[in-house]
Every structure is written in structure tokens, then in C-alpha cells.
Amino acid sequence: MLKAKGRRDRKAEARLMYEANSQDEWGVMHAAEQRVVEHADVIAQELDGLALLPLAGDDATEEWKARCIAAMASDGEEFVEKPYRPLDQIMDELLADKPTLQDMRHKFDSNWQEIPRRKTELYGMLVVDKSTRRHLDAAKVVPHFLLPTGRMVKECYYVVPGSQATSLIIKLDPQTQLWAKESKDVSDQELRNTSSDALCSALGLVRGRGTPECLSDNGWLGSVVSCFKTELYGRSFLEHLDAEPTFELTAFLGGRGLRAKPGACIEVVPLLPEMCVSLCTDWHVPEEPG
């Protein structure tokens, strides 16, 4: 119609070509799937291929791959193997290219599939039903909350269990990357505030703007904190804090330290939470004389 009027609509042409190509590729993939199911489990469909796993009890041998490729091919269509890299390999390649991404490793949570489900249940409980009885359900969300520092709550606080009065809380200082032992009263209030922020974020709400009353109730938030503290237990962490592996490191203000290397050499290194250091000098790293 546009050509009849002597005009071209390249956007419309591109869209039409995309739709036609997608339908053609879907037809090829659908036919290939019907032929390969006797050799493999199809775990995902893509426009340009199928993600396959061996049937139960089989191994991903070269012979199995050849059988799958031969079964899928027909009418002149050709298929080749495109192996998926495991997560560890992908991370190693990313980190080799971008060393600054090293801190990303801690963000992968084995419970990642559970978090969206818990958030949905939480919304139904607090916003729809306006129920405040199930503290445990709310407490399951808070430890996985990503703080502005880029670390989850459960990676910034450790609780060393003891009696109600003597349990110790160790907190990561995001500025210095050092761990510090906090008084119970101060840390509990901080955890209540963090819980309120975490639950507001999970609900997609802004704190103080039409949020459920329980999210500003210190008593209710205190019950939530008591529930999730068990996930922060870190008795073994206390054993690693300032332990022998840290003896070769002297921490300074500003998030840097000096570490002894073999051969009586000393290097300046950034402090990392994984170093488990709490002891620090009162000075910045000395500058080399110019």
C-alpha cells in the first residue's frame, strides 16, 4: 500500500521482516523439537535453537550430541552445538576482564528463587489482609535485602549467640570495610530500621507514605528482628575475626592496609570484608616520600 503511494516505511518493513523471520524460525524449531525428543529433554526453546539435556541416566557424550544434531536436521536446515558455559566459568571470564567485579560473587544467593515468592506472600499478608501476626514470614525477606553498599543484610551483620543480654552483634562498616562489635541496643534499633526499609522495598512502597502501620511499629519490627537473627548467627565468624591469617596485615583508616609479602616486601592493599579485620590504626596509610 505504501509502495503504491510512492513512499517507504522502513520501520514497518523491518517489523514485517522480523515477524516473518520469527514465524519461519519458530516453525523450524518446532519441527526439530518433535524429532529430537526421543533423544533428549528439551528444557528451553529459543528462536535459533533448543536447550537440551540428556535423558535420565544418559551422559552428554559426543555420540549423543551427534544423534541430536542429526535428528533435528531436515529439509536443508543445519544445526551445530553451542554449549552453555557453567556459572563459575562465566564469572571467571568476567572477573578476568573486570577485576573490580570480584565483589559480585557474594551477591549470588542460593535461595534466589524463593525471594519473589516470599515477597508476594508478604504483600498479601501486610497490604491485602492487613495481618501482622506472621512475623516469621516477614523475617524471611529481610536478610536478603540488598543494602545501598551492594551487600545483603546477612553479609553485613553477624550475631554471636549467647544469653538474651549477652548476645554479640558484629557489623561491617561500609566506609572502612572493618568489622566492629556493636552494643545490643544500638544494633537492634539499626536492624529494626533496616527491616522497615527492607519490607517497604519488598512491597514496592516508600517508607512513611501509606505503608502498613506495623512497618513503623518498633514492637512489631523487634519481633521480626528476633525471628531473623538466627539466620545471622556466626559463632565461627568470631573465630576468624582478627585471627592468625590477619597477622601479616596492618589496617589503616580509609579502607586500605599494608600487607607483608615474601621477601620482606610490603604492599598497599584495599581492605575487604572477607579479610575479617576489626583492629585498625588511627592513621591513614603513609605516603611514599616523593
Image (tube, grey):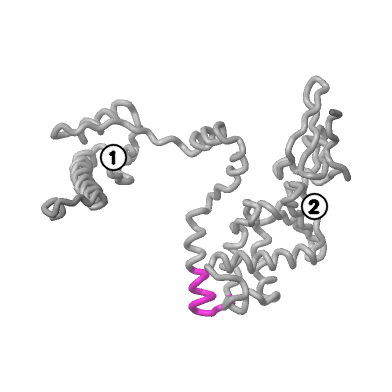
Q: Mark 1 and 2 residues: CB-CB less than 8 Å, in contact? A: no
Magenta stretch encompasses residue 57: no
User: Is residue 150 or residue 109 the one in the foreground?
Assistant: 150
Residue that label 1 marks: 49
Any magenta on residue 131? yes
Name the amino acid, label 1. Gly
Residue farthest right in this picture: 282
Name the residue carrying label 2: 180
The amino acid at mark 2 is: Ala
Determine the CA span between mark 1 and mark 2: 52 Å
Q: Residue at x 29, y 26 (%)?
A: 63
Q: Residues within 10 Å of mark 1 (few under 14, many from 20)?
A: many
Residue 241 shows in this picture = no
| Numbered range of the magenta stretch | 121-133
> Which of the image's four quarters has the N terminus?
bottom left
The overriding secondary structure of the stretch rendered in magenta is: helix
Q: Secondary structure at mark 1?
A: strand
> Considering the image in quadrants, where does the C terminus appear?
top right
Give the farthest residue toward the top. Answer: 263
Q: Which of these two is toward me, 18 or 80?
A: 18
